Image: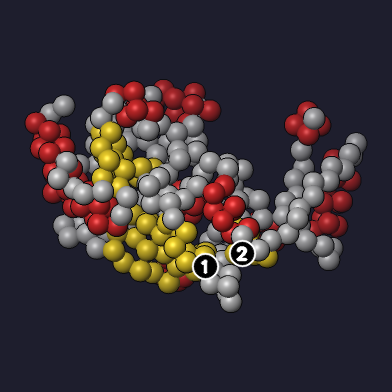
Amino acid sequence: MTSNSLKFLEKFREVKNLEIIESQSEVKRLSKDFYNYSPILTERLDTCIADVVVRPSDHNAVKKVAKICWEFSIPLTLRGSGTGNYGQAVPLFKGVVMQMSYLNKLEEFDPDTGFVKVQSGCVMGDLKKQLEKYGRELRLLPSTWKTATIGGFIAGGSGGIGSIRWGFLRDPGNLIGLEAVTMNEKPDLLKFDAEESEPLNHAYGTNGIITSLLLATDIKRKWYSIVIDCIEFEKTIEILKTLTSAAIDLKLGAILEEEIVD
């Protein structure tokens, strides 16, 4: 490590409610996502490893990390569960990876509106179980919902399971608001309504450190999977179009090859 790295590490050790991870194997693991699906990204990103990983457990620790990184001009990369596969959570220029998994609480639930306020590091599979206690469910889910964090989904996702009914994450009514820490000389925790949140939605944490989200939910339903076997591709499209315009609730509609279904 450089002398500059040692200086900012000393500063980190003074921060309360902040875990510092220096083990090379852990730092390497937490510097990667699933970009290895791509041979092009593998060649470009395999050597991109952070100097250190930190895990804050409250807003104040997040602000302190942002302030230290600003003071020392240290690159800061945000990470949830690292389930993306385009290198979104990879530190291109070393520096610090801030993993948000300790900010994982469901803070509030409004039974009148169905809105839920949840910290950004909450795993969506865990949030799903907590919402079931209130008879609710998330409107939209990525295919990686069992392990992905809700903050990572908003910052890096676009839609998924549920989009056939609720559209994309950026469509009105899905994200009601969020809280984020600024990245500047004096980091502050700011609150944004639905319209103000739009620039941070699907921005990969590049314009603010998302710490909590206010999301719309849906009534919990018991969903069933049905597979319709079609020989002709045109007939498959026709059936799916009929289903999407019918008066039935759909969570997902997909055309898949036989091998995938099997």
Spatial CA distance of label 2 from label 1 is: 9 Å
Between residue 232 and residue 87, name the one nearer to us: 87
The picture places residue 102, in percent across and down from the top left corner, at 38, 47
The figure's colour scheme reads secondary structure
The three-letter amino acid code for the residue at tag 1 is Phe
Image label count? 2
Q: Quadrant of residue 230?
A: top right
Classify 10 Å Cα crowding around label 1: few (below 14), some (14-19), many (20 and above).
some
The picture places residue 105, in percent across and down from the top left corner, at 44, 55
Please tell me whether residue 31 is drawn above or below residue 79 in the rendered image: above
- Quarter of the picture containing the C terminus is top right
Circles 2 and 1 in contact, beta carbons < 8 Å: yes
Q: Residue at x 47, y 66 (%)?
A: 108
Residue assigned mark 2: 134
Between residue 191 and residue 168, name the one nearer to us: 191
Question: Circle 1 — which element?
Answer: strand
Classify 10 Å Cα crowding around label 2: few (below 14), some (14-19), many (20 and above).
some
Q: Quadrant of residue 76?
A: top left
Give the side of residue 135 with respect to residue 229, left or right: left
Give the side of residue 101 with respect to residue 139, left or right: left
The picture places residue 253, in percent across and down from the top left corner, at 75, 50
Q: Is residue 45 at least partly visible in the picture?
A: no
Give the side of residue 136 with respect to residue 101, left or right: right
Which of disc 1 and disc 2 is earlier in sequence? 1
Q: Residue at x 59, y 52 (%)?
A: 129
Residue assigned mark 1: 109
